Image (tube, coloured by chain):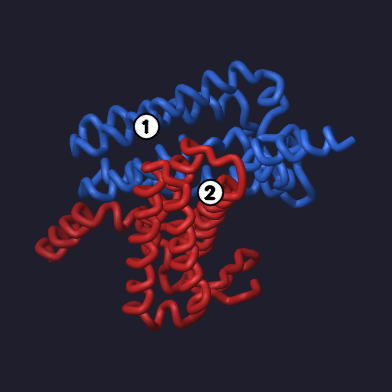
Chain colours: A blue, B red
């Protein structure tokens, strides 16, 4: 029994941060990941507006850094199986396939991560034409996951 | 008249990105800034969990970068005067004083910005003890604004 408790404590210590995430309720996971996407979308919108008129390098750098930091933040931890369904008034658009095709999810996530980090790198150069190209690639990487794993309607 | 139109076009071109933000509805501003704070809070929570058990440098770096990128993202643009009140079911906790004391808001915003960027810098060093100190300072900078400009209840 003592051995079991010691093992449990060790597991708790080693996986502390992972555990902290697991303690989130499914509806909190849904709300937190949607918050991340919404705030990132605002920043993507700022980059788009800058590309359309009055390019401001500092604003684009700040927005691209936010997009990359969101991509790097480990949002996979916000997708427990229980968070795959609506919880009361908290709705999710994630499709069941998301939880059935982990390899495909990983492939799309890695691609999005790569493009988002490249966007931050290109933004720092101040080359608006290059940012425009990379912004398009990043948007495509977002869309690839939406097309496959997000319901159109809530 | 032509001069006026030309001036208006110039203003539109120069302030394109600022204008894009102004076109957001007040309720969208409320939802977007709350999304930013919620997603940042998740990342602050990850740093806290790492400091309590099983410190993982990569996870702390990623989370601190998200906190800094959020601080650097120019959220002031999400606080139009019209967004200072509830819009239907979209509630805000911002106090009227926020819009009456721009100098105080700026002072607190600059302080929060400084601490968040320092958090990202310290996280990159991998020094958990230093991260703990800087995490505390960042939390204090968040709280300073909450105490002054955020209602306790929705």
Q: Residue at x 67, y 40 (%)?
A: A13
Q: Secondary structure at mark 1?
A: helix
Q: Secondary structure at mark 2?
A: helix
Of residues A60 and A1, the one drawn nearer to the viewer in this rendering: A1
User: In the image, which is nearer the foreground, mark 2 or mark 1?
Assistant: 2
Above or below, A2 relative to B71: above
Measured as percent of width and height from the top left, residue A28 is found at 68, 49
User: Which label sits on residue A117?
Assistant: 1
Measured as percent of width and height from the top left, residue B71 is found at 39, 56
Of residues B19 and A85, the one drawn nearer to the viewer in this rendering: A85
Mark 1 closeness class: few <14, some 14–19, many ≥20 residues within 10 Å: many
Q: Quadrant of the N terminus of chain A?
A: top right
Query: In this view of the protein, can residue A44 be seen by the observer?
Result: no
User: Which label sits on residue B51?
Assistant: none
Q: Residue at x 41, y 69 (%)?
A: B80
Q: Which picture quadrant has residue B31?
A: bottom right
Mark 1 — on which chain does it sit?
Answer: A
* Residue at the left extreme, as displayed: B3
Q: Quadrant of the C terminus of chain A?
A: top right
Of residues A19 and A129, the one drawn nearer to the viewer in this rendering: A19
* Residue at the right extreme, as displayed: A1
Q: Residue at x 66, y 33 (%)?
A: A94
Q: Residue at x 38, y 27 (%)?
A: A115
Q: Is residue B152 left or right of residue B130?
A: right
Mark 2 — on which chain does it sit?
Answer: B
> Are circles 2 and 1 on residues that touch, CB within 8 Å?
no
Measured as percent of width and height from the top left, residue A10 is found at 71, 36
Q: Which picture quadrant has residue A99?
A: top right
Mark 2 closeness class: few <14, some 14–19, many ≥20 residues within 10 Å: many
Query: In this view of the protein, can residue B10 be seen by the observer?
Result: yes
According to the picture, the residue beneath numbered tag 2 turns out to be: B47
Q: CA distance from mark 2 to mark 1?
A: 22 Å
């Amino acid at each position: 029994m003592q051995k079991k408790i010691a093992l449990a404590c060790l597991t708790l210590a080693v996986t502390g941060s992972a555990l902290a995430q697991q303690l989130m309720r499914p509806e909190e996971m849904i709300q937190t990941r949607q918050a991340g996407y919404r705030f990132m979308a605002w920043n993507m919108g700022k980059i788009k507006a800058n590309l359309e008129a009055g390019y401001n390098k500092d604003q684009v750098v700040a927005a691209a850094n936010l997009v990359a930091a969101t991509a790097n933040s480990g949002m996979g931890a916000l997708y427990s199986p229980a968070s795959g369904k609506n919880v009361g008034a908290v709705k999710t658009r994630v499709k069941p396939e998301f939880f059935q095709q982990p390899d495909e999810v990983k492939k799309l996530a890695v691609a999005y991560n790569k493009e988002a980090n490249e966007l931050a790198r290109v933004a720092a150069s101040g080359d608006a034409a290059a940012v425009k190209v990379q912004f398009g690639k990043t948007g495509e990487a977002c869309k690839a996951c939406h097309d496959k794993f997000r319901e159109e309607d809530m």
